[in-house]
Image (cartoon, helix red, strand yellow):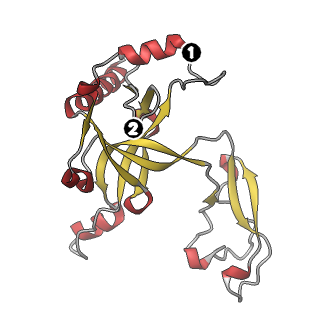
Amino acid sequence: MENLGQVYRKLTTAEKTRHVLGQIFWIPAYLHMQDYHVVRVGQWDRLASITTAQFKIEKKTFHGLGRSADLYHHMPIPELKLKMDEELLVKKVKRRPAVLILREGTDPRRLATHFSGVGQKPNPNSHVFAPITSLRKEGNLGNDYPQQFIDKVNAGDLPEFIHLPADGTVIKNESMALLTQLQSHGECFVEETELALDAVYLGAALETFWQDLEGQLLI
């Protein structure tokens, strides 16, 4: 197992509020589900406020998304600017730690408008994170990952996963960061911590991951 001094570092107060790459945050990580569930308007008088509407949750396949039965093609929810080819997805989320991978993501539409000479450069509004999940928990029964898999993650044989030993504060269990499930969240929906991955450790992991992707392109 790695020496903890080479994996983690504590951030200063200034670094913590600046949001540095590799910093550990708490995020509302959404979980991947086998089926799509969407919120649909049931009964609603379109002349009344949207707060008077009754909603229902429907199970949909991918091919059923954005296909409303409304013959007049009205916006289902004008207040949310929901168009006929858009849906409100029901997402299952869990509060979990995550590694900051990309800082200050911007809205591409607003950025394109700025480059066209119209409007100011958009302010950053989101960060991109790699969610962290436990490999095994003390006293856990039946939900730990198999030891053979944990050994491969620990050895770096699976570049899409960054091995993270328990640090005793934020990362309570031996864990891994999932580079295959990157998620974007607004800054107002995440909580910063003073724990961060060492820059060299994170850089080496990302370099290995990128080299693996390049290798797949050449196959």
Tell me the residue that label 1 is attached to: 146
Report the amino acid beneath label 2. Thr
Give the residue at the far right of this rendering: 43
Instruction: From this view, report whether residue 63 is shown above or below residue 51.
Output: above
Q: Of 207 and 27, which appears nearest the observer? A: 27
Q: Secondary structure at mark 1?
A: loop
Image position of 76 (left or right of 79) = right
Determine the CA span between mark 2 and mark 1.
25 Å
**Residue 88 image offset from top left, x and y in percent:** 62, 61
Report the amino acid beneath label 1. Pro
Q: Quadrant of residue 5?
A: top left
**Residue 201 image offset from top left, x and y in percent:** 25, 28
Q: Of 101 and 80, which appears nearest the observer? A: 101
**Residue 150 image offset from top left, x and y in percent:** 48, 16
Instruction: From this view, report whether residue 184 is shown above or below residue 108.
Output: above
Tell me the residue that label 2 is attached to: 169
How would you rate the neighbour count of disc 2 (Cα within 10 Å): few for under 14, some for 14-19, many for 20 or more? few
- Which of marks 1 and 2 precedes in the sequence? 1
Q: Quadrant of residue 74?
A: bottom right
Q: Quadrant of the C terminus?
A: top left
Give the residue at the far top of this rendering: 148
Q: Nearer the viewer, mark 2 or mark 1?
A: 2
Query: Contact (CB < 8 A) between labels 2 and 1?
Result: no
Q: Of 159 and 152, which appears nearest the observer? A: 152
Q: Quadrant of the N terminus?
A: top left
Image position of 114 (left or right of 136) = left
Report if residue 8 is visible in the image.
Answer: yes
